[in-house]
């Protein structure tokens, strides 16, 4: 992985979307997920169908894709099909895919990101956590850098 990409990913983890480069494509997974997208009086539910479509559109641009995952989870019905479709798209297109997963994101959206991301990073204070479903998830911590760009030594 290029040093510039590593710097961008670290900045996204620490600073948020303000650090997203203009030449990257953003795909958000922030609402609860279900088989089909719906809008309710109390908010929106993101559908696996809509997520797969947004992912396909992002890959077609042939720019790095960032999955920004902050979904509280949702239905598992449709998850396997969506993950398979996204994996097929991932093989079809050559754009690199990265995911930043918030510490409070739950399993359904996180599993989609794990299926297709070249690199997955956790944004939050915990690098090892027990997810809401009881599954243990260990994600790669981000190394801090010295001012000169070298990794900080312990």
Image (tube, rainbow, N blue to C red):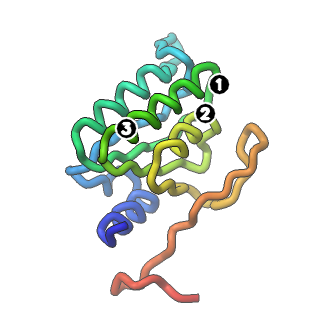
User: Upstream in the sequence, badge 3 or badge 1?
Assistant: 3
The answer to whether mark 2 and mark 1 are in CB contact below 8 A is yes
On-image quarter of the N terminus: bottom left
Within 10 angstroms of label 1, few (less than 14), some, or many (20 or more) residues?
Answer: some
The tag on residue 27 is 3
Within 10 angstroms of label 2, few (less than 14), some, or many (20 or more) residues?
Answer: many
User: Upstream in the sequence, badge 2 or badge 3?
Assistant: 3
Residue 84 higher or lower than 105, as above or below? above
Residue 87 higher or lower than 53, as above or below? below
Q: Is residue 82 left or right of residue 74?
A: left
Percent x, y of residue 133 = 75, 37
Query: How many numbered marks, from 0 up?
Result: 3
Q: Is label 1 in a helix, a strand or a loop? A: loop
Percent x, y of residue 18 = 32, 53
Where does label 1 land, which residue? 76
Between marks 3 and 1, how big is the CA–CA gap?
A: 20 Å
Q: Is residue 67 left or right of residue 4?
A: right
Residue at left 66%, top 57%? 138
Between marks 2 and 3, how big is the CA–CA gap?
A: 15 Å
**Can you tell which quarter of the image residue 107 is in?**
top right
Residue at left 40%, top 53%? 16
Q: Is label 2 in a helix, a strand or a loop? A: helix
Residue at left 74%, top 50%? 136
In front: 89, or 100? 89
On-image quarter of the C terminus: bottom right
Percent x, y of residue 55 = 37, 33
Residue 41 higher or lower than 59, as above or below? above
Where does label 2 land, which residue? 108
């Amino acid at each position: 992985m290029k040093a510039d990409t590593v710097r961008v990913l670290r900045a996204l983890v620490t600073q948020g979307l303000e650090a997203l480069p203009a030449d990257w494509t953003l795909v958000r997974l922030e609402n609860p997920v279900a088989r089909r997208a719906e809008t309710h009086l109390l908010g929106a539910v993101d559908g696996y169908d809509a997520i797969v479509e947004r992912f396909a559109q992002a890959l077609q641009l042939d720019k790095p894709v960032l999955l920004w995952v902050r979904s509280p989870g949702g239905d598992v019905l449709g998850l396997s099909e969506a993950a398979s479709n996204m994996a097929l798209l991932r093989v079809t297109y050559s754009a690199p895919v990265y995911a930043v997963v918030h510490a409070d994101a739950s399993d359904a959206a996180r599993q989609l990101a794990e299926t297709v991301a070249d690199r997955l990073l956790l944004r939050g204070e915990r690098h090892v956590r027990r997810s809401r479903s009881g599954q243990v998830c260990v994600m790669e911590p981000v190394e801090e850098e010295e001012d000169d760009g070298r990794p900080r030594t312990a």
